């Protein structure tokens, strides 16, 4: 029983008094209250997402420098992704989006320019041209799963328009080496054995050859080259196993740009042509020479077939002169806009 603190005079011997019996009864009644364990305070539910921790006096800890952690890359079925050049701020970067317009992702964030992205045959890596080394444009490979970047060429000129061979063993590209005209080069997929295979045409300016595209069977390369006027191009076919000069296949289509792409079955090419600032997409049948216009206005360029041939991706200025990526069917119907950014999105390429 706890001690009762009523002052020392209660137990003094100076003057004996009779102890009041009612105090004794009150003491007996108070004992149960000291033996009962007090109820714990009601638990307060912690708001979702809040971690309660003990607080300590604040201390200063220098923050580590910021690091970039890549976001998950869009995933999809065969031919389900589109990679493209996206201008963001003062630089051109590489972006990717799913075919339905979802999963938009900016892949590069460097303070340099990146152009001409192309996916490897298995879709696990990207090749592109960039001036991040010494000012000249070289080819780089970026492994998507690890963000590892590998320099494939080293100061061999100014390189652009890379593309894998259908079997993934070779890479073609255009190169402007020194004072020579632009030429067609091929190297191994690991960047070794880079060599000139066609020296271009020594007329109509120093950049007569502006783009190249490998045929689906890997036997031919379509080239966009000048003939007798700078910045006016015609399409040629170059046989890799032949020593003959490239064969011109387009006539009468004015204002052809440097964009050229094969159909999946290899019987036609997608071209962009027309007056300045008013280009349209055409399908050109190689054997017959028949040209079919697929768009009507909008200033369109860089058209490419999807791997299954069911869609065509291209960039267009039809949205108030804002460059965006669009899709359409091979006959020009079912137009769909899949990017919408105030800054330009252009040069689309499909996942193989």
Image (cartoon, rainbow, N blue to C red):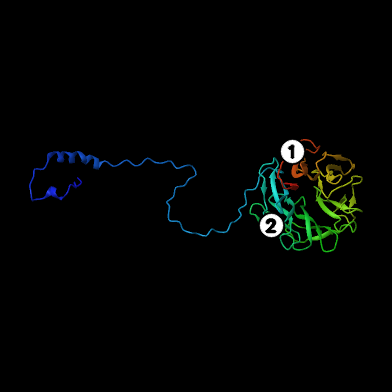
Disc 1 packing (10 Å; few <14; some 14–19; many ≥20): some
Using the rendered image of the protein, determine whether residue 240 is visible from the camera's viewpoint. no
Indicate which disc, 2 or 1, sits on the residue closer to the N terminus.
2
Residue denoted by label 2: 111
Expressed as whole percent of the image width and height from the top left, the position of residue 62 reads 52, 60
Does residue 303 appear to the left or right of 226 in the view shown? left
Q: Classify mark 2: residues with Cα within 10 Å, few (<14), some (14-19) or many (20+).
A: few
Q: In this view, does 288 lie to the left or right of 45?
A: right
Q: Which of the two residues, 45 or 290, is positioned nearer the viewer here?
A: 45
223 relative to 311 in the view: left or right: right
Which residue shows up at 18% across the image and 39% down it? 26
- Left or right, 46 with respect to 129, comes to left
User: So how many labels did they put on this image?
Assistant: 2
Q: In this view, does 149 lie above or below 265?
A: below
Q: Distance between the residues labelled 2 and 1?
A: 32 Å
Task: Residue 116: give x, y in percent of width and height.
Answer: 76, 52
- Residue 154's label in the rendered image is none
The image shows residue 173 at horizontal and vertical percentages of 79, 56
Which of the 4 image quarters holds residue 269? top right
Q: Quadrant of residue 184?
A: bottom right
Residue that numbered label 1 is attached to: 336
Q: In this view, does 179 lie above or below 71?
A: below
Element on which disc 2 rests:
loop
Point out the frontmost of discs 2 and 1.
2
Q: Nearer the viewer, residue 91 or 156?
A: 91
Q: Evaluate if marks 2 and 1 touch, with contact meaning CB atoms under 8 Å apart.
A: no
Helix, strand or loop at mark 1 = strand
- The quadrant in which the N terminus is found is top left
């Amino acid at each position: 029983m706890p001690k009762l603190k009523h002052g020392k005079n209660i137990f003094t011997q100076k003057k004996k008094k009779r102890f009041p019996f009612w105090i004794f009864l009150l003491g007996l009644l108070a004992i149960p209250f000291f033996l009962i364990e007090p109820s714990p305070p009601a638990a307060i539910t912690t708001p979702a997402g809040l971690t309660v921790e003990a607080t300590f006096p604040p201390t200063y800890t220098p923050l580590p420098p910021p690091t970039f952690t890549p976001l998950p890359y869009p995933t999809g079925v065969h031919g389900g992704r589109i990679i493209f050049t996206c201008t963001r701020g003062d630089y051109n970067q590489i972006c990717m989006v799913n075919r339905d317009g979802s999963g938009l992702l900016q892949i590069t964030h460097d303070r340099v320019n990146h152009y001409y992205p192309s996916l490897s045959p298995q879709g696990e890596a990207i090749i592109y041209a960039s001036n991040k080394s010494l000012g000249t444009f070289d080819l780089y490979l970026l492994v998507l799963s690890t963000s590892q970047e590998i320099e494939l060429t080293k100061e061999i000129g100014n390189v652009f328009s890379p593309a894998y061979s259908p079997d993934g063993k070779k890479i073609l590209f255009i190169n402007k080496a020194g004072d020579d005209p632009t030429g067609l080069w091929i190297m191994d997929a690991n960047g070794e054995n880079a060599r000139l295979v066609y020296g271009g045409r020594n007329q109509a300016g120093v950049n007569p050859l502006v783009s190249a595209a490998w045929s689906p069977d890997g036997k031919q390369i379509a080239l966009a080259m000048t003939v007798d006027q700078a910045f006016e191009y015609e399409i040629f076919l170059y046989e890799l196993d032949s020593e003959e000069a490239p064969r011109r296949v387009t006539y009468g289509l004015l204002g052809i740009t440097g964009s050229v792409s094969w159909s999946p079955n290899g019987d036609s090419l997608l071209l962009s042509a027309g007056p300045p600032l008013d280009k349209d997409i055409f399908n050109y049948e190689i054997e017959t020479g028949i040209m079919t216009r697929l768009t009507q206005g909008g200033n369109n360029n860089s058209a490419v077939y999807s791997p299954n041939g069911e869609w065509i991706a291209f960039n267009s200025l039809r949205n108030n002169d804002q460059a965006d990526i669009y899709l359409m069917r091979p006959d020009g119907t079912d137009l769909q806009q899949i990017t919408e950014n105030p800054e330009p999105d252009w040069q689309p390429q499909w996942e193989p």
